[in-house]
Image: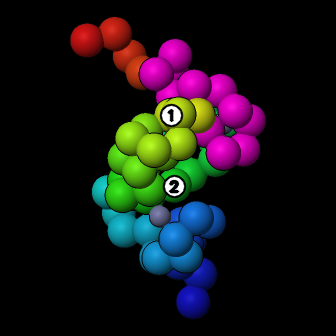
């Protein structure tokens, strides 16, 4: 009942999605939407507008 859902596509977040924290503000999206945001929506967190790139650990 209490399965968290992706706020963008409304799909249930699986374990991988749930351990994936794209933004330090805590706004969680599924990996699918994360990709989509990076490819089509200028790669910013929908909640706080921080670019995801800026938060990615250095390669
Ligand atoms: Zn999603
Ligand atoms: Zn954020």
Tell me if residue 33 comes above or below residue 9 in the rendering: above
Some atom of ligand 1 lies within 8 Å of the CB belonging to the residue at label 2: yes
Q: Quarter holding the C terminus?
A: top left
**Colour scheme of the picture:** rainbow
Tell me the residue at 51%/55% (across/down). Answer: 29
Magenta includes 47? yes
Magenta includes 18? no
Q: Residue furthest left?
A: 59
Label 2: element kind:
loop
Query: Residue 9: in sight, yes or no?
Result: yes
Prevailing SS of the magenta stretch: loop
Q: Quarter holding the N terminus?
A: bottom right
Figure quadrant, ligand 2 = top right
The residue that mark 1 highlights is 43
Q: Residue furthest bottom?
A: 1
The CA distance from mark 2 to mark 1 is 12 Å
């Amino acid at each position: 009942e209490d399965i968290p859902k992706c706020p963008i596509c409304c799909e249930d977040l699986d374990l991988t999605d749930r351990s994936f924290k794209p933004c330090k503000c805590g706004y969680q999206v599924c990996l699918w939407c994360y990709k989509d945001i990076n490819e089509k929506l200028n790669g910013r967190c929908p909640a706080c507008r921080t670019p995801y790139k800026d938060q990615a650990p250095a390669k």
